[in-house]
Amino acid sequence: MGFRTTFLMAGLIAGLTAVALPAAAGDLVQKPALSVWGSDGHFQGYSAAQTLDLSSDAEKTTFTAKVAGSLAEPTYDFNLAINQKANDENLANRSLGLGASWNAREAAIRSSMARSFGFGVLPKSNYIRVSMDMNASQPVYDRTRAPLARANVRSELTLDGRPVASIAVGGGTMGDEGVDFSLTRPFDLPAEFTVSLRAADERVQDGRFMVKLVRSTW
C-alpha cells in the first residue's frame, strides 16, 4: 500500500464518474467527494470517496469506497448501508451496516443492525427500537496480539413520536464492560438523565451521572 497503490485507488474512485455509463446508470454512481489539504504551502493529505446508490423500491442501499490520509500512510475504507424505506403503512424498521478499513497500522471491521417494533394504535409513533453494533481491530505490526473487539446492544422507547428512555449494555475483549441507562425528558422536563458504569478486572473503574439539556417545545 505505497505511493502507487494510493494513487491507483484514488484514480479508480475518481474515474468511476468519468467513464461512459448508460443513461439508466446515471443515478447509480453519485458525485464523488474529493478534497486535499495542506499547511504552510505544503501538501498534507487528501480524501477521495465514491458512493454507489444500489437502492430498490423497498430499501435505500449505498456502497461507499474511500481512501484518505497522507501519501505515505493512506487509509482505505469500505462501507455498505442498507435501510428499509418507510411508507404510508409502516415505519422504516430495519437497517444494516457493514464496513472495513485498513492502513499500515491496523485493520478493522465493523457492523451494525437495528430494528423497530411498533405497538398500539399508532405504531409509527409508538415503538421500541433495538440496535446492536460490533467492532474489531487487529494491529498489523503485531499479528501475535489478539484482536480488540467490542459489542453493544441498545434499546430505545419512543412514545407519541418522542424518545422517552433507553438502555444499553456493552462488553469487549479489553474488559471494558459497562451498562448505560438514560431517561429522556421525563415528566416533560427538557433534560436527559444518564447513569453510566464501566467495569474492568471485575471492579468498577468509572461511574458517572450526567444531565444533558435537550430542546423541547418552548
Image: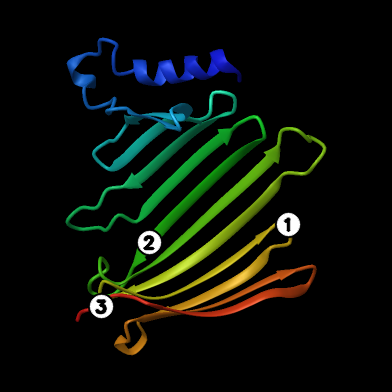
Kindly give the residue lying farthest to the bottom in the view shown.
187
Q: Quadrant of the C terminus?
A: bottom left
Q: Secondary structure at mark 3?
A: loop
On the image, the x and y values in percent for residue 170 come to: 61, 63
Tell me which numbered mark, 3 or 2, is placed earlier along the sequence.
2
Q: On screen, 32 above or below 203?
A: above
The foreground one among 157 and 66 is 66
Q: On screen, 216 above or below 96?
A: below
Tell me which numbered mark, 1 or 2, is placed earlier along the sequence.
2
Amino acid carrying mark 1 in the image: Met
Q: Which residue sits at x=75%, y=33%?
A: 141
Amino acid carrying mark 2 in the image: Ser
On the image, the x and y values in percent for residue 183 come to: 43, 80
The foreground one among 98 and 196 is 196
Estimate how packed mark 1 is, as few (under 14), some (14 to 19) or many (20 or more) residues with alpha carbons within 10 Å.
few
Q: Which residue sits at x=17%, y=17%?
A: 23
Estimate how packed mark 2 is, as few (under 14), some (14 to 19) or many (20 or more) residues with alpha carbons within 10 Å.
many
Residue 196: numbered disc:
none
Cα gap from disc 3 to disc 2, whole angstroms: 23 Å
Are dots 1 and 2 in contact, CB under 8 Å? no
Cα gap from disc 1 to disc 3, whole angstroms: 38 Å
Tell me which numbered mark, 1 or 3, is placed earlier along the sequence.
1
Q: Secondary structure at mark 2?
A: strand
According to the picture, the residue beneath numbered tag 1 turns out to be 174
Front disc: 3 or 2: 3
In this rendering, position of residue 206 left or right of residue 4: right
* Number of marks present in the image shown: 3
According to the picture, the residue beneath numbered tag 3 turns out to be 216
Q: Quadrant of the rendered structure where residue 203 is? A: bottom right
Amino acid carrying mark 3 in the image: Ser
